[in-house]
Image (cartoon, coloured by chain):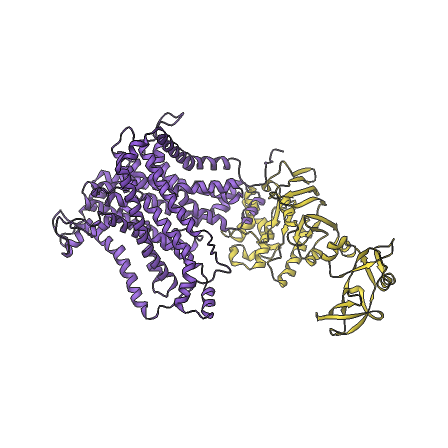
Amino acid sequence: MRSSVRSGNSQPRWLFPFVVIVVLVLSVLPLARLAWTGIVSALRGDAGQLLADPALWSATLNTLATSFLGMIAAVILGGSFAVLLTLFDVRGRSALGFLFMLPMMIPPQVTALSWIGLTGPSSTLLKALGMAPPLGSPQPLYSIGGIALLFGVQHAPLVYLAMRAGLLALPKEGVEAARLSGASTVRVLLDIVLPLAMPGLVAGAAIAFVSGVGNFGIPAILGIPASIYTLPTLIYSKFASFGPTTFADISIISVLITLLAVAGLSVEARVLRGRDYRTIGLPGQAAVFRLGAVRLPAEMLLWLVTFIILVLPFLALLAGSLAPAYGVPLNLETATLHAYEEVILRQSVTRSAFTNSVSLALASAFGLLVISVLLGYYIVQTKSRTAATISALAEVPYALPGIVLAVAFILLLAAPLPILGFSVYGTIWIILIAYLSSFLAVSLKPVISAYRQFDPSLEEAARLSGAGFYRRMRDVLVPLIAPAAGSSIILVFLIACNELTVSALLWSAGTQTLGVAIYNLDDSGSFNLAAALSVLVVVMVVVLMLILELMARRLPAGALPWRR
Amino acid sequence: MAPLILNSVTKRFGSGAAAVRDLSLTVREGRFLALLGPSGCGKTTVLRMVAGFEQPSDGAILLGERPLADGATMVPPERRNMAMVFQSYALWPHMTVAENVGYPLKVRKVAKEKARQKVREALSAVRLETYADRRPAELSGGQRQRVALARCLVTEPDVVLLDEPLANLDRHLRQEMEETFRDFHSRSGATMIYVTHDQSEAMALATDVAVMSEGRLLQMASPEEIYARPEGLVVGGLVGQGAILSLCLPPPSDRLLDWPRLRQALLEPMEGRESSHVLVRPQDVILDSSGLPACVISSFFEGERYALRLELQDGQSLRSFSRQAVRPGDMVHVVLTSGWRL
């Protein structure tokens, strides 16, 4: 009969082809193209010249050094915050936790700019306070150590989150059982808590390392002026001085970055092998230890660190943005909003950057929402190996360093599109496609957790009521996942609006994004304009994060990256 | 409306053992079938195949002349004109009670005024008229269940499916809901299939009981029939209370056994003969001094009587009732007035 369909599942026929095309375009094709170019140029011997170039090896060394030192800084910072805020009776834990998470969502180039504003001879803040080092003394952050320090600040929240998840999994009963067995607080920490926290710590360290390897914003602002190149900034500079071997060079460097990232992750896998510490029994309330007499000093230390890594740099940025003409000291009389006027009203470059970033971010957020709602439905409904593969492929682009993804899309889309005959390269569309690819996992995650959370009989009841696929989507599924969908829109908007790494390679005249605009303003010496733009960006990030924080109660667990 | 026919239906999930094997049954129009069996016996899979959420691997499902599903094609659930009460109620939390109940009408594009009228009728049938504007979250378990039932009422479905609908309710509410279901069945005249593992629920509600075990249909008959004449050990053990004795009976023998025969079999075990299983209901075990001696193992006061567990001299157990108090360890004499060879 006509109304028959071939199988018992609830998906319309076009869903599977749609899902395959999405994953093909956003994940498989660009990555396959990158691997192909990398392999072909290596085989053709184009690699010889590159591999003989000492710049490549010093960049590799710099990448390893900054990422490794940055990882250590992130582990010390993030680990101690995670332990203190999760396990001990520190007051104001949620406020401290939220503030500590902020650096994760603030774009790296803004972090770098704000720290530059905090140190060195040209710091407006230090000058206003009369503490600036003498002119001509070097900017201390323009160094391997400076880059590593900022990696540490930027990636500490990742360690914090990974470790906190492990610590929260330890139920109160486990600690109470150890207490009854006669163990003291210190013994419980050493024998029970620390071993259970290890997997989270190692995982967090690995993520911090890999994020360092792929970070572009910080080494671009701190490294390039001092000719300290890491692999991502090396790609950028190769691309800036475009030559006949550029495509081959950048594809090989990209493969190298990917290999370093994979190496970092496989060290993690090796360390974690054989450690299955999934909690046995019901997860209860997390254990809380009393700090006793050291509580106040510990709290003061936590607030001091938060002040140093968050408030001070922001004040420096603010001071820089309010600074009057060069050489005039900043005080209440001389402070001026001139820079803001300039970036918001006068400069056509920053105004078009605002327009570009906001439209890109809106298009990515809403486009990805549609994709995620359909892709998530397929992944949750289908229990086959294909679905697991598709789910994994959708995650890959987000896991890859942004610069690698940008290179992959350049290679894929530089030539005119087949059949259509025109190229999207150099237009805003290539940035949009790269954003869709890069943030697919960000958008998908809350949607999938929401789908998993609700009872499948809710959809089955709608089917028996006679509702077809579109009807069910509209009346039942979408209303039920609405809070998660809302958070997915805001998250993608937040990340896409501040993005620098991908657009740094893909922008051209007229399509620069906010991230690129900030970088270019700083590069051309307009620190006050870059600072003003950065302050606006930070304010936007904080407002959007607060909105999400207010929504958090209605969101499925794991929807927000800074709340797990 | 027409009979619902399942014809040699088999369902395999993945490569494992079949969840439902070669199951055939016919539910005549307007009947109330209880699918009874222990958890994991495949009864819910049968229900989900009838609803259209699962496709049979083999065999066919028909509603009268109309094929609903076979191994190759199937009518999707949205075109089957069936309704279901789910174990979890499956009420949409973002809609009010009236919107939940009226949703099938909205999808079928029934005129607004008429739909409102039908919703009102359905809600009054389950005594929830005053709750029309509440959200499901504000209702109690029993009220949610009644909303789910009202949602089944509005569209006059060909078949109504109920998946362990009372499993999440307390004892008191269960009785009230059983009443509601019976009322619903007689009022709507719909064909109903009710999945349960609770035999007393099945007996109390259904016009037909189908007992399943390990994916197979063991017996389908009226509650009275299945209680009086169960087929095989599994059905005998599942339906009603009773003890199963292992006795050697002389062939050929009737399946319904009286006291002389039972006494003979108990007193004079015939060596070498294969033993048969005999079901003895507790009400057929009477404390009588002319009977066989038995030892009281346990005795529980149930209110109207004592429920006893007895052990015969050969070690086999029996269940019985007593009006008088009996203590564990007492010796009694019992007469088995009737037994059924399984």
Name which quarter of the figure residue A188 lies in: bottom left
Residue B206 vertical position relative to residue A255 in the rendered view, above or below: below
The image shows a total of numbered marks equal to: 0
Location of the C terminus of chain A by quadrant is bottom left
Q: Position of residue B115 (x, y in %)?
A: 56, 46
| Residue A564 visible somewhere in the drawing | no
Q: In this view, does A25 lie above or below A284?
A: above
Q: Quick check: can you spot residue A523? A: yes
On the rendered image, what quadrant is the N terminus of chain A found in? top right
Q: Give coordinates of residue A88: x percent, y percent.
A: 37, 64
Res B57 quadrant in image: top right
Which chain's colour is purple? A
Q: In terms of depth relative to the viewer, which is nearer, B63 or A154?
A: A154
Image side of residue A84 versus residue B174, left or right: left
A212 or B339, nearer to the observer: A212
x, y percentage for residue A116? 21, 49
The color chain B is rendered in: yellow
Lateral position of residue A32 relative to residue B130, left or right: left
Task: Give the percent coordinates (x, y) of residue B233.
Answer: 75, 55
- Who's the residue at 40% across and 60% down the image? A194
Q: Nearer the viewer, residue A120 or A146?
A: A146
